[in-house]
Each structure stands twice: as C-alpha cells, then as structure tokens.
Image (spheres, grey):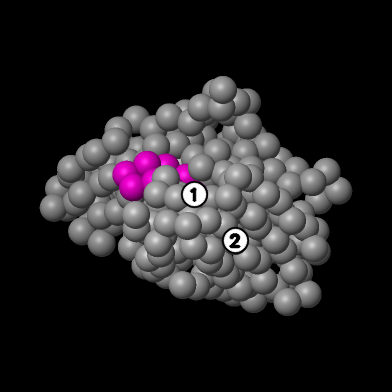
Amino acid sequence: ELKVEQNPLFLSMQEGKNYTIYCNYSTTSDRLYWYRQDPGKSLESLFVLLSNGAVKQEGRLMASLDTKARLSTLHITAAVHDLSATYFCAVDPLFGNEKLTFGTGTRLTIIP
Amino acid sequence: DVKVTQSSRYLVKRTGEKVFLECVQDMDHENMFWYRQDPGLGLRLIYFSYDVKMKEKGDIPEGYSVSREKKERFSLILESASTNQTSMYLCASSLPSPRDKGGWTQYFGPGTRLLVL
C-alpha cells in the first residue's frame, strides 16, 4: 500500500522567514503533484513534477523531486500572509493507473 | 476556464437516507474521481471512472456507489447514509495521460460538506 507522509502537519511561521515542507512516499514514482487549499475552498493545482531532479518555481514557492530518495520538498521563501493555506502533495505510482494518493496535508499559518 | 461543479455546497441528511451527490465538468475530461476529506486523513479516493459507464473502486468504496451515464457527469450515491459518512466530499476530473506524454492535473470542484444526523 502506498503511503504518503507530509511533515510537518502544522506550521506557523513569521512573515519574511523561509521554510520547507517535506513529502515522503513509499513506492516508486515519477509523478508528484502539489496542491493548495484555502479554508473552506477546494484544491488548486500548484506544481506537477515529472522526473528525478525536477524543480518548479512560482513566486515564493519552489518544489523539487528526488525520486531516488522518494522525497519532494516545497520551499517557501520570505513568507507572506497570503501563503497561509493547507498544502497537499499527491503521488502517482509508477505502475499505477492515474490514481493519486494524497498526503495528509500541511496547514501553514503565516504570522505578521 | 476549467470548471468542475458540485450540486450542493452543504447538505444535511438523516441516517438511513439515500443521498446523491452530483458532479459536472465542462472540460470533456475522461477521468472523474470522488474523494472524501477528513481532518488528519487528507483526501481518500472513494471511486473513479475512466469513461462513461466505467468505474473502479478506490481505497474506501464501502457504503458508496457511483454512476456515470454521461461523460460530463459523475454521481456519488450513499445507499444508506450513516453518521460516519459525515465529511467533505470532493469531485475531480482530469484528462488521461500515458506516461510518455507527461503528467496531468486533477481539477477539483468546490466540495460538498455533508452532515449525517
């Protein structure tokens, strides 16, 4: 059974600081996705990572994928309040059939 | 613009009732999914469908069924609602994507928050 673990589950950080969210998964995969969810809202796609070493950046967020370590990171640079949300990673196993397995999410709160 | 809609944002039902949750997408996507989201558990896949009249069980199909009579519409049915089915239900859709064609994104609807009393 594929397991996807995120840590931390909760993260409270001050504006202007940097931090990293980690996503570990238990099976071979070459496709990993990051989503964002605002309170009371649905999920919005952030990044699609498709190969070992893939790096994607959008504004203050940067995601990377290390398929050998079965690890993806979401790095936040100089956090601002509007990045407060819950972030999910999701994994599509190499021999899967387009089903995603989601992590439990990281609730990020940026404090002014 | 990509659009996935769900029939209700909030729903209150009684134990034992039959409940229908509807999802419609306007992107001509082949794949459609139903998830439930619970605090501390993330999203868990209930059922998915690759095409009209095709369905496959996800990780937690017990107590649920689905129907896909048209490509754009995917319904989740709770045959006899129970209190442990109180949850947020999210529908998503995507294009199929062979591995040599790159990845794909699931587009999510706004969710239906269901309370079973």
Residue A56 at x, y percent in the picture: 71, 51
Residue B101 at x, y percent in the picture: 83, 43
Q: Is A104 rendered above or below residue B93?
A: below
Q: In the image shown, does B47 or A49 lie closer to the viewer? A: A49
Residue B15 at x, y percent in the picture: 17, 52
Q: Can you tell which quarter of the image residue A27 is in?
A: bottom right
Q: In the image shown, does B78 or B1 lie closer to the viewer? A: B1
Q: Residues within 10 Å of mark 1 (few under 14, many from 20)?
A: many
Q: Which residue is mark 1?
A: A36
Magenta stretch: includes residue A42: yes
Q: CA distance from mark 2 to mark 1?
A: 11 Å
Say what secondary structure mark 1 lies in.
strand
Residue A1 at x, y percent in the picture: 59, 74
Visible in this render: residue A104? yes
Q: Residue at x 57, y 57 (%)?
A: A77
Question: Of the residues under marks 2 and 1, which one precedes in the sequence?
Answer: 1
**Residue type beneath disc 2:** Leu
Magenta stretch: includes residue A56: no
Q: Is A75 rendered above or below residue A46?
A: below
Q: In the image shown, does B15 or A35 lie closer to the viewer? A: A35
Q: Can you tell which quarter of the image residue B40 is in?
A: bottom left
Tell which subunit mark 2 falls on: A
Q: Nearer the viewer, mark 2 or mark 1?
A: 2
Tell which subunit mark 1 falls on: A
Q: Which residue is mark 2?
A: A74
Look at the image and give the residue range highlighted in magenta: A36-43
